[in-house]
Amino acid sequence: MILIDGKKAAAELRAELKQEVTELREKHNKVPGLTVILIGDLTPSQIYVRNKEKSANEVGLKSEVIKYPESVEEKTVLDKIKELNSDETVSGILVQLPLPKHINKQKVIETIDPSKDVDGFHPMNVGNLSSGYESSVPCTPLGCYLLIKKFEPNLNGKKAVVVGRSNLNGKPMTQLLLKENCTVTITHSKTKDLKAECLEADIIVAAVGIPELVRGDWVKKDAIVIDVGINKTDKGIVGDVHFDEVSKNAKAITPVPGGVGPMTIACLLKNTIDCFKRSQI
Ligand code: GUN
C-alpha cells in the first residue's frame, strides 16, 4: 500500500505557485489578491480562514480577510461583494461557508463575479465545468484530482465511484473524472448496495461526511482511495474511510489528516492565480 502524501504534494504545489507569483510580479508589476469574507465566529471556519491567509502570504499573494459579526445584514455582505467585484486589486473572492441562516447562500454566490469566483460555486462556473469549458473548479475536488493524477497519470477507462453528491465535492469531482475518460458512478445515502458499487471501483472518492463508512472489504486490491471526510469522533478526527482496514487492501490511500486537506488550500491559491492570469489577457 502506498500512502498518498497530500502534505508533501501541497508543499510542492505551493512552491510552484510561489515561483509563478514571482514571475507574475515581474511581468505585471502586481500580484494576485485574495479576499476572504468570514461571517460569525464558528471555530472551524476561523481556523480554515487563518490557514488560507497564512498560505496566501507564504506564496506571495496579496491577502485580505473581511470579518463580520453573525448578525450582519445580508445587504451589507452583498454590497461588499459588489465593491470587491470592481476592485482591480482583488483577483479572487471567497465567502466562507456555512453562512448564518438569515443570509441567502445562493444570492451570495451569485453576486460574486464569476471571473473572481475562486470557489467555483457560481452557476456560470458550474456550467462551464460540466460543459468542459475553462472554469474555476471547487478547491477540494481539484485537490483530489491533482492527487489522483500525480499517482496515476492515465485514467482512461478507469471505473471511478464517487461517494457523495454535494455541490462542493461529489458533483464537481464527477465532472473532473469524466473529463479524464473515467466511467463514473455517483453514489449517495440512498444508494442500494454501496459496498457492491465500491467493489467495482478502480478509484474511490469518499465525500459523504459519515465516519469510516468505507470498509476494508468494500475495496478492490488495486484501488486508489481518496478520503475527503473530516469527522469529529470520540477517537479524534477520522475520514469517511476506515483507514486501518482499507489501507491493508487498497493500492494507495490518502490519510486523514494530511491527505486532501492541505491540497484544498493550495488549490485555492492556484485558483486565485489562475483568475488573475485570465484577467490580464
Ligand atoms: N467551508 C468549508 N469548505 C469550504 C469551501 O471550500 N469554500 C467555502 N467558501 N467555504 C467552505
Image: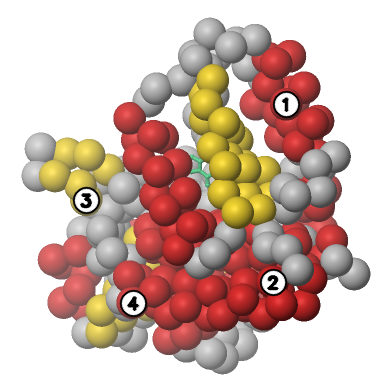
What residue appears at the point 32 percent right and 70 percent down from the top-left corner?
7
Query: SS for tag 4?
Result: helix
Number of the label disc, if any, that sits on residue 80:
1
Mark 2 vs 4, N-terminal side:
4
Q: Amino acid at mark 4?
A: Lys
What residue appears at the point 67 percent right and 43 percent down from the top-left corner?
93
Q: Which residue is mark 2?
A: 25
Image: 152 above or below 200: below
Tell whether circle 1 marks a residue whose Cβ is less than 8 angstroms from ligand 1.
Answer: no
Image location of residue 77, percent across then percent down: 68, 21
Image: 176 above or below 229: below
Badges 3 and 2: C-beta atoms under 8 Å apart?
no
Image location of residue 89, percent across then percent down: 75, 50
Q: Which residue is mark 4?
A: 8
Q: Amino acid at mark 3?
A: Val
Between the C-alphas of marks 1 and 4, the distance is: 36 Å
Q: Which residue is mark 3?
A: 238
Observer able to see residue 261? yes
What residue appears at the point 46 percent right and 50 percent down from the top-left corner?
52
Q: Tell which tag, 2 or 4, sits nearer the viewer.
A: 2
Quarter-of-image position of residue 41:
top left
Between the C-alphas of marks 3 and 1, the distance is: 37 Å
Q: Amino acid at mark 2?
A: Arg
Decide which of 106, 213 is in the foreground and name it.
Answer: 106
In this picture the colour scheme is secondary structure
Decide which of 197, 186 is in the foreground and name it.
Answer: 186
